[in-house]
Amino acid sequence: MENIATRIARAREAKGLSQSQLARDMGISPQAVQNWEAGKANPKGDRLSSLAMILGVSVDHLITGAPMKAWPSEVDATSPDALSHPGLQGISVWDDQTPLDDDEIEVPFLKEVELSAGSGKFAVESNSRAKLRFGKYTFMRLGIQPSNVVCMPVKGNSMEPLLSDGSTVAIDTGATAVVDGKMYGILYEDMLRVKILYRIAGSKLRIRSFNRDEYEDEEVDAANVRIIGRVFQSSTIFS
């Protein structure tokens, strides 16, 4: 059965590269390439993009088996001809009525729920129909189930300049185990917030704001904090 492992091997052979040569070009160990082609591990993130570029195929081809397209490395993206190149796509306009492409997924955007990155109360109104669109491979390469994703706006200045008031965060509700120093959406003291979390002794959590000039760390009982999920993407608006 064809999968990402077989597609990596086939693309590598088509480029005339050995596993050792590919590993050297990527700056990784030959064992890593062997593991990919044996199906023991999958390349992710920047490493997946680098692999696709070196092999001369698209990331989508490696992940899903979509028709092979050359990586457009030979095209100057600033050139007037760039948008007409078959390996590049122009910007398309869509609205809520535009049908999803085969490689797109819609996730809920809860406009009525404001994640507090400062202080204050929040209001929740039901029946939001707003959606945000993501490419399928974004979730596939991150190992995130689309049904676990929710997007919410940020309110307040406690995460500035990383996240400004009005920014949008995407949260993986399937990732609730705390990894020190990572950002989470949490419910604490009847407020929804975006904060950096750390585990500390005695079943406690340290809640940290990025704007530490104005906001001090809080040490709280972990049992009093509901972790909604880990923030894996953000869109920041600077006004």
Image (cartoon, rainbow, N blue to C red):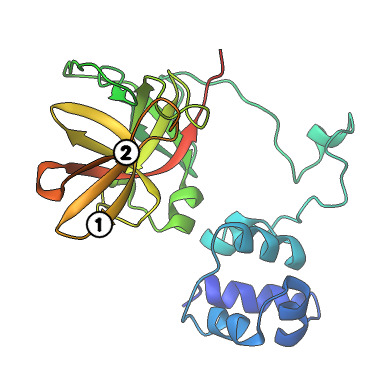
> Residue 23, how many percent across, how many down?
71, 79
Please give the residue where the numbered disc 1 appears in the rendered image: 200
Up/down of 172 relative to 106, above or below: below
Up/down of 159 relative to 67, above or below: above
Q: In the figure, is residue 213 to the left or right of 130? A: right
Specify the farthest residue to the top: 239
> Residue 39, how many percent across, how many down?
48, 80
Residue type (three-letter) at the residue carrying disc 2:
Asp
Evaluate whether residue 131 shows in this view.
yes
Question: Does the residue at mark 2 contact the one at mark 1 (Cβ under 8 Å)?
Answer: no
Up/down of 27 relative to 176, above or below: below
Secondary structure of the residue carrying numbered label 1:
strand
Residue type (three-letter) at the residue carrying disc 1:
Ile
Q: Mark 2 or 1 closer to N-term? A: 1
Check disc 1: other Cα within 10 Å, few if <14, some if 14-19, many if 20+: some
Quadrant in which the C terminus appears: top right
> Residue 45, how many percent across, how many down?
56, 57
Give the residue displayed 78% in from the left and 74% down from the top: 25
Please give the residue where the numbered disc 2 appears in the rendered image: 217
Residue 189: image quadrant is top left
Secondary structure of the residue carrying numbered label 2:
loop
> Residue 220, how many percent across, how many down?
17, 43
Check disc 2: other Cα within 10 Å, few if <14, some if 14-19, many if 20+: few
Taking depth in this image into account, of 62 and 142 the one nearest to the observer is 142
Give the residue displayed 27% in from the left and 56% down from the top: 199
Q: In the figure, is residue 232 to the left or right of 82? A: left
Estimate the spatial distance between the alpha carbons at disc 2 and disc 1, rounded to whole Å.
12 Å
